Amino acid sequence: MSRKIRLGAFLPGGGQHVAAWRHPDAPSDGATNIGFHIRLAQTAEKGLFDAYFLADGLSVGFSGGREGGSAKAAGFEPVTLFAALSAHTSHLGFIATASTTYEEPYQLARKFASLDLISGGRAAWNVVTSTGDETAQNFNRDEQLPHAERYRRAREHVDVVRQLWDSWEDDAFIRDKATGEFFGRDRVHEIHYKGEFFQVKGPLNAPRPPQGHPVVVQAGASEDGRDLAAETAEVIFAAHQTLAKAQEFYRDIKARVAAKGRNPAEVLIMPGVAPFVGRTQEEAQAKYDRLTSLILPEEGLALLNGLAGGTLDLKGYPLDGPLPAQDTTEGNKSRQILIREIADRHGFTIRQLYQYVATARGHLTLIGTPETIVDTLQEWFENEAADGFNILPPWLPAGLDDFVQLIVPELQRRGLFREQYEGRTLRENLGLSRPVNPWTEARAQLAAE
Amino acid sequence: MSRKIRLGAFLPGGGQHVAAWRHPDAPSDGATNIGFHIRLAQTAEKGLFDAYFLADGLSVGFSGGREGGSAKAAGFEPVTLFAALSAHTSHLGFIATASTTYEEPYQLARKFASLDLISGGRAAWNVVTSTGDETAQNFNRDEQLPHAERYRRAREHVDVVRQLWDSWEDDAFIRDKATGEFFGRDRVHEIHYKGEFFQVKGPLNAPRPPQGHPVVVQAGASEDGRDLAAETAEVIFAAHQTLAKAQEFYRDIKARVAAKGRNPAEVLIMPGVAPFVGRTQEEAQAKYDRLTSLILPEEGLALLNGLAGGTLDLKGYPLDGPLPAQDTTEGNKSRQILIREIADRHGFTIRQLYQYVATARGHLTLIGTPETIVDTLQEWFENEAADGFNILPPWLPAGLDDFVQLIVPELQRRGLFREQYEGRTLRENLGLSRPVNPWTEARAQLAAE
Ligand SMILES: Cc1cc2nc3c(=O)[nH]c(=O)nc-3n(C[C@H](O)[C@H](O)[C@H](O)COP(=O)(O)O)c2cc1C
Ligand SMILES: Cc1cc2nc3c(=O)[nH]c(=O)nc-3n(C[C@H](O)[C@H](O)[C@H](O)COP(=O)(O)O)c2cc1C
């Protein structure tokens, strides 16, 4: 079987683009409308996407602008939303973001195990450390933990969660009505975890998930982030503007994965792509211009500041002048650097920068016909830049509908994408193997000796 | 409109009774089977139940027996499960248990707000403080917090959660595509909570729930528990064996509610009832005997010990002898006292006690025809012992099917129960008013002055 492109879909009900909700085709209440989310999930499944992906944060994140940019400020919690959406779909995976900094591993392991059980093996966890003092202030702190500490905690957290998922062996249940034996006590394990941050006895009060472990996803871009990804992630989400940068990242991560003794083929790198597709180049460009024209300037500035973790106050600077130099040592480092790179590369003014960034917040924007867009996807896929893509339709539902109707058939025509789902679980569709349970493995080894 | 009986249904997929899963009619994998839970929810809705209720704990709670009693040891997390079940139902409410001791108010407020939004206003939170060192050990502690501290924390927790639910006013969203105004910043509020246990800035990143607040449910039986219930709960779950005890509790709670300045009619007291119903008394008794015969003795002892919070080790005592005296100052107080009361009142041997308790863990067991069972429900309902009942079908699905087919029609015939749902939200069906938002109220008052 030839290697296929994997596809995730970012479908926040409020739309990806800062002005998405203002688009005449979009429902203005998409962010809080369950029916709209059901429609999106069903469309993604019709398009044979591997998974529905939701980013997430634990604070409102007021932008300081006119608040149009905060169409996503209030909405659903991803895991509960996905549990509901799983009832309306049968093959689509669900990648929910959850924080290692503000959630307890026991609760987190349990809710993802529950989602995996509810959906028949379609859950994935996007591991994030959560940035910003705003968020810390919702959780009994004045300011956030330092970057390095957040990552040490993340590493330990993922470790505890995985051990909890393994605490019941797959064959733990006997369920013998005659003898009254419900499960084999020797197949259920306390984990007695004691680390720098966590002390967890276990076992989890949920069976081993259908996938063994829900798929683990990660998106950190810093050194610590890359290391964590190489150690723990099976899917890596990234934001790149050029083939060269994407290749650098791809090769770096695959090398780190190999260095950790893991199989690089089992770590899928999926950069984000925001497509504007038209039957002609002009039609595509008109779609881009249409959406871009809907951004209020104050919203655009607020967006840049928000992306930079509140460290980029551009009020007072001329909109049609350049981005002023500022300190990049604090806040959301990787994102601020990304923003500055874009401005430098294109020689953008502030206005041009926010219009560009608003579209996909640092991800690759493609404006073209199905042919030209698939040309780029194929180039990245075949040249060590990507194993698949996370598609960020700029506005919804039309941006998703366009992708499914125009781009998916072109991908299939070139043999780059599935004609039907390979399996029922997300792992099966992504081609990732099911993790072995270490307790089961240890017993098998013992028996073999 | 005459006062109607409210009904909740306890439907753990593994069945209520310790031997439920061994019953020939029951699926042995009910606890982890999503399809089975969907069927239960749909049956409860057909029976016009107000809500599906799930108890919950945060540890496996090994019984030490043959583990048959732990058919519920591993299963779904209630909020994710209910999110999925809401997709398969349209009127049924969902009461999910969640802990004030081990969850952060921001996360808890958010997941219940999300469930309420997903289900169109059908969510309720059963507030528990969680007992036991086993649970504490899954959350970085060696032992649990003292009883009084758990309750102080619970009070503060509920307070924070309610403030977060109110942090967005109902009319906060403007969603004006023309002006780009998505919401009114003056209708969204930081709460700046600073208490003994929590410091939470807010606002919540979820809109005000459709019900204003999901319904708040409570079940503590101690002095602290009753006070918390009187202060915060809108539905109170309780376990009573006799009309007199139920009346004492009912009157005590209603008096406490009034003393707090709340309306006693807005606090519904719903004791638990485990019904064995047959077309004849003999048929009902045969159902009881059938299920009781399936309890393994070691399982029965483990159950008693488990109910008493691990403080009642009866191994070695003769099964057909009396319950030995032991210390009741530690552990799960209200439950251990309840167990001893039952033994004393009936003069039960250890075996008889576990057989009896296994059925409904301290709740009222009714064995009879639709007429005799409804006689008792009516007596309690009309004599200040209950505003409704939480039904604990001893085994599933038959125990629920029986209730819907045999008891519901008898309740309806007597005009004690609805013929159809009164509304779409749980509050509407329970006849509870929607909480006023204090920010909105304050503004209205200011405008009136
Ligand atoms: C492409 C991308 C997507 C991200 N998505 C989220 C998200 O949904 N929620 C979140 O809290 N953080 C998100 N992050 C932040 C990272 O998880 C991480 O906390 C942040 O980038 C700081 O770590 P770093 O310095 O390693 O990048 C994302 C980061 C990147 C690069
Ligand atoms: C009828 C009843 C049902 C309860 N259900 C739960 C439950 O599902 N989960 C839980 O953690 N505690 C449950 N509890 C425990 C209480 O929430 C409380 O923590 C415990 O009873 C100790 O407090 P108390 O001394 O006030 O009763 C229940 C208690 C009673 C009386």
Image (cartoon, coloured by chain):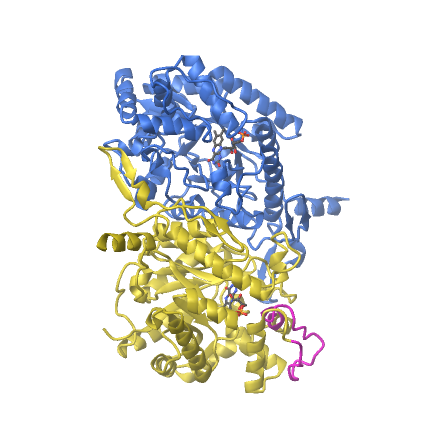
Chain colours: A blue, B yellow
Q: Is residue B160 visible?
A: yes
Q: Is B20 drawn above or below residue A350 in the view shown?
A: below
Q: Is B305 drawn above or below residue A7 in the view shown?
A: below
Q: Is B339 drawn above or below residue A273 in the view shown?
A: below
Magenta stretch, residue numbers: B303-327
Magenta stretch contains residue B309: yes
Taking the spot 60% from the left edge, 48% from the top edge, the residue there is A164
Give percent across and percent down for residue B162: 40, 55
Q: Nearer the viewer, residue B333 or A336?
A: A336
Dominant SS type (magenta): loop
All told, the count of numbered labels is: 0
Magenta stretch contains residue A199: no
Q: Is A320 drawn above or below residue A102 in the view shown?
A: above
Compared across the picture, whether B348 is left or right of B395 comes to right
Quadrant housing residue B252: bottom left
Q: Quadrant of the C terminus of chain A?
A: top right
Give percent across and percent down for residue B358: 54, 73
**Residue lying furthest front:** B449
Q: Is residue B397 visible?
A: no
Q: Nearer the viewer, residue A20 or A258?
A: A20
Quadrant housing residue B233: bottom left
Q: Nearer the viewer, residue B202 or A227?
A: B202
Compared across the picture, whether A271 is left or right of A188 comes to left
Give percent across and percent down for residue A184: 64, 58
Give percent across and percent down for residue B113: 39, 51
